[in-house]
């Protein structure tokens, strides 16, 4: 059952996010709004000890996000959300810091190029290039975990699909929060929840999509990984809320990945908004981080065991 705190948070989110986004008619207006929200105190609760250090991999801007418990040999490679059009670094870095700290890992935030200035395939190209650069620099795939929210969840899966086709080593696993998996918007939740989603409405979703793909076919698997062949992928944890337009993107993707024989854990939470784990004020967010931490620890352990067995 959803908490009273979550219900109150949804009302605040509806007022300061959805209603204002619905009045945006351009990417610049949306970016200005998101910047103001990213600086909005009640949304940001950065953990003590968080350190953010700019860096580059494959000439792509990135940020190391570390906590006192971070270890140098494990990495959470994070692809942020934002409709492929914007970034809210304070909120995303705070979440990544918590996840990195809980898993004794370093966080690496990929600041991929944004649409509409850099439409598809700029974002997946950047994410793929950063992971390949990590491998070239000697980071071990069994010590890397992908994570992403919303558009970033899309990039998590498209990057793994590209790696599989290139026959490159896969990460130990992946976390996807409210992933955008079906750009054709065929899920019923996109319409049934169009009045209830406290984060954004269908018009805003389509504006961001069109900025990213232009006149491209939305069913191309590299754009909408729901339509891909999902065989032979790493273990994944997928979570979403019941009040969001993209709930069916998460559920249907989990079903297809499971049918393809993958190790899939799906966690659908009643009453929570889009990308709810980012909002640490919510009890449901803290519980999700615990579940994801346990999942990451288990899959890191399994990947290490497999690698040890191969070496022997």
Image (cartoon, helix red, strand yellow):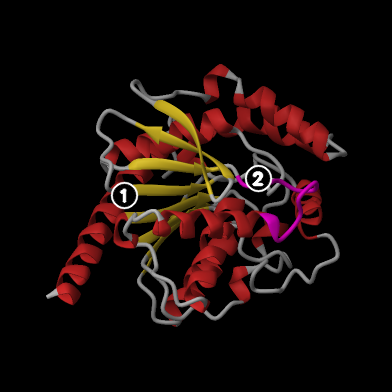
Q: Nearer the viewer, residue 44 or 272?
A: 44
Whole-percent x, y for residue 197 in the image: 65, 45
Quick check: marks 2 and 1 in contact, CB under 8 Å? Answer: no
Whole-percent x, y for residue 11 in the image: 62, 30
In the rendered view, tell whether residue 177 sits above or below residue 37. Answer: below
On whether residue 219 falls in the magenta region, the answer is no
Label 2 crowd bin: few (<14), some (14–19), many (20+), radius 10 Å: many
Q: Which residues are magenta?
A: 112-122
Quadrant position of the C terminus in the picture = bottom left
Q: Nearer the viewer, residue 38 or 304?
A: 304
Whole-percent x, y for residue 133 in the image: 47, 55
Q: Residue at x 57, y 52 (%)?
A: 152
In the rendered view, tell whether residue 30 sits above or below residue 206. Answer: above
How far is the residue under mark 2 from the one under mark 1?
24 Å
Between discs 2 and 1, the one toward the N terminus: 2
Q: Is residue 279 visible?
A: no
Element type at marker 1?
Answer: helix
Quarter of the rendering containing residue 247: bottom right
Residue receiving disc 2: 197
Whole-percent x, y for residue 117 in the image: 80, 46
Q: How many circles with numbers are drawn on the protein? A: 2
Q: Nearer the viewer, residue 210 or 113?
A: 113
Q: Nearer the viewer, mark 2 or mark 1?
A: 1
The overriding secondary structure of the stretch rendered in magenta is: loop
Residue receiving disc 1: 291
Element type at marker 2?
Answer: loop
Label 1 crowd bin: few (<14), some (14–19), many (20+), radius 10 Å: few
263 vs 117, left or right, is left
Quarter of the rendering containing residue 39: top right
């Amino acid at each position: 059952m959803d908490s009273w705190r979550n219900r109150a948070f949804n009302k605040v989110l509806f007022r300061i996010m959805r209603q204002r986004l619905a009045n945006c008619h351009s990417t610049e207006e949306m970016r200005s709004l998101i910047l103001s929200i990213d600086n909005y105190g009640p949304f940001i609760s950065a953990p003590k000890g968080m350190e953010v250090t700019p860096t580059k991999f494959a000439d792509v801007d990135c940020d190391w996000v570390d906590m006192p418990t971070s270890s140098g040999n494990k990495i959470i490679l994070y692809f942020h959300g934002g409709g492929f059009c914007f970034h809210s670094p304070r909120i995303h870095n705070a979440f990544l810091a918590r996840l990195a700290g809980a898993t004794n890992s370093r966080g690496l935030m990929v600041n991929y190029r944004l649409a509409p200035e850099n439409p598809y395939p700029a974002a997946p190209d950047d994410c793929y290039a950063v992971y390949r650069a990590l491998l070239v620099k000697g980071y071990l795939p069994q010590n890397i975990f992908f994570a992403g929210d919303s558009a970033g969840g899309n990039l998590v899966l498209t990057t793994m699909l590209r790696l599989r086709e290139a026959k490159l080593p896969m990460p130990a696993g992946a976390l996807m929060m409210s992933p955008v998996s079906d750009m054709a918007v065929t899920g019923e939740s996109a319409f049934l929840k169009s009045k209830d989603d406290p984060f954004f409405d269908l018009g805003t979703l389509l504006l961001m999509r069109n900025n990213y793909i232009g006149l491209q076919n939305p069913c191309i698997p590299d754009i909408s990984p729901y339509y891909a062949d999902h065989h032979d992928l790493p273990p994944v944890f997928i979570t979403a809320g019941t009040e969001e337009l993209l709930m069916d993107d998460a559920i249907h993707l989990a079903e297809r990945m499971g049918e393809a024989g993958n190790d899939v854990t799906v966690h659908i939470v009643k009453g929570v908004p889009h990308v709810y784990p980012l909002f640490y004020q919510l009890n449901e967010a803290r519980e999700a981080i615990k579940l994801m931490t346990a999942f990451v620890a288990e899959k890191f352990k399994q990947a290490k065991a497999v690698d040890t067995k191969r070496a022997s």
